[in-house]
Image (cartoon, rainbow, N blue to C red):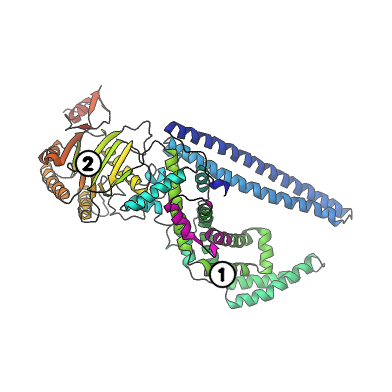
Amino acid sequence: MNAAAAPSSSAPKSADAALEERRARNAHWSTEAEAARARVRALGNARLALFVIGGLASLWLIKTHVTSWPLLGLPVAAFAVLVVLHHRADLRATRAEARRAAAAFRLARREARWSDLPAPEQAGDLPDTHLFAHDLDLDGGASLLGLLGAPAQPLQRPSALLRWLTEPPVLDDVRSRQDAVEELAAHDGLLEAAAALPHGETEARTPSEPPGNELLAWVAQPPAPPVAWEWYAGALLAPAGLWASIQWLLLDGGPSLLALVALIEAFVDQLAVKRRRATLAAADMALARLARVQGLLRLLDEHNAQTDAVRALQASVRASDHSAHAALATLESRLDALNTGRRNPFAFVFGFILRLELPRRRALETWRARWAAHAPRWIATADAFEALLALGAYRRDHPEDARPELLSGPARFTATGLAHPLLASDAAVRNDLSLGDPARLLVVSGSNMSGKSTLLRALGCNLMLAFAGAPVRAHALSTTALQLGASLRARDSLLDGRSRFFAEIEGLRRIEQATNGELPVLALLDELLAGTNSSDRLAGARTLLEHLREQGALVILTTHDLALTALAEEAGSAARNVHFRDELHEGRPHFDHRLRAGVVPRGNGLELMRSLGLPV
């Protein structure tokens, strides 16, 4: 088994142990990366010195008419050895630097230093009408996708990770992912190796394809080998170019013949310039993602799978007649040869004279003709494996978080010690929360900044993590399968001619329609109907909440309007009032963010306005 995929020692058992492990791994890879870069610099300096000294020595030998080929060839051979050693050292340094960056990310995540984390994938692939994705902390700077290390450019869009976080849960699939996450969390070497794979950022893409779909777009194209006349021209010009080069370099012939052949070759290239550019640009876009896909599938193939989910991924890319990562490694080498022939000056001149681009392009199209039908499955498998690895790394780095218990039966959930996963675990205030038969409505009252909206986002984010297969920021959490619906961030739109209130009721309509689906709805409603007058707010809220309860939905409602707390009292045992309170000290509000039973006993609005000098 590859060393990178070998299981490490047992995962940390506590938050402190996880933090110490992250700091140790960060220090280790920082030292390794610096040592590797020092070796690259030393070999680079040695190569430069040998080039200068060898060049001067060769000139001296030639001027003194000492034409000993062994003496002239010795510095050339030594320089070639140094080039190979420098290249290998540079590759090792690149890998060490990638692991250092991955270790630094995991340490910053463990310490909740959001400004040090890279930008993650965005949820732009999801429609604006999604039931909750745009209301909860899914994407952006401090977000779930950032917390889980989702790359800015996924292998396909939407990525498996984004789908698991936002699609209605199938509990058997969730349990399978939970088992896979626990398995992968025990293999820190595998997690580090996967995180260090290149993400393949590129600006080259077809206008019709969003970032992340370049490789899929390329393999979907039909093979386009060079046309017949290009082959005939190459068959004539390649030997002519070789003979002209030999004449000029070895037989003391003039450069005229070589210049003539090169001119003809340039003319032939110009005739096919559009075709060549399209092929080569598409190859560039494919190569940008290929190393990551190939690396993930290699790690998957070498891993000793223990759970059904990981075994299923392995089975999807294994067959009796081929290995997915081996086939992709062949493609990568052919693309690399094509790019080297275009970008390395010596290789370009040599390849131009001998028309080497034609067989390289033909080899590329031959590969695509054989393997293109398999590539979408390979990419989807790599994407799913990457998502499981991200969840596994999160599990290893947060051993104090709970594995959710998935329940059958009537809609309900219970959480003890619930906190927002984006807050540092030692700074977050934890609360207990439960909803289900008989109480299906929770009305949360309190002032601004007391914690009402944070409670909704904490619950929504933790349920997204739970249904993705990840651990949750709680001491314990149990839930049935639920369809989340959220109305927290309704905004007005000048361009669309839409008020905030209209945007809110559009969102509420979508949540109401979701109650006709297969799963019970959990509705998270922040400041319900705050954009209308108090009379309409109370009447509308009463009717809407009654309808949602009749449809079997669970509802958590936050409000400043204490009149809405009467709705929970009217519902009897089917609803409960809870609240966050605050106190004013020297004119400033202080919050403990603790959830308490009952209605908030008082407001602080007038006192706060008076403390700031307003005449109220």
- Image coordinates for residue 565, horizontal then vertical, percent: 14, 37
Q: Position of residue 367 (x, y in %)?
A: 55, 67
Work out which residue is located at the far right of the displayed protein and give it: 65
Give whichever of discs 2 and 1 has the lower sequence position.
Answer: 1
Rate crowding at label 2 as few (under 14), some (14 to 19) or many (20 or more) other CA atoms within 10 Å: many
Residue 157, horizontal then vertical, whole percent:
41, 57
Q: Main secondary structure of the magenta part?
A: helix
**Count of picture labels:** 2
Q: Residue, x 20% and y 42% (percent of image)?
A: 557
Q: Which residues are magenta?
A: 302-331
As drawn, the label of residue 435 is 2
Q: Is residue 222 left or right of residue 517?
A: right
Question: Residue drawn 53% across and 37% down?
Answer: 25
- Name the element at disc 1: helix
Callout 1 amino acid: Thr
Quarter-of-image position of residue 44: top right
Amino acid identity at mark 2 = Leu
Residue 366 marker = 1
Find out whether residue 314 is within the magenta segment. Answer: yes
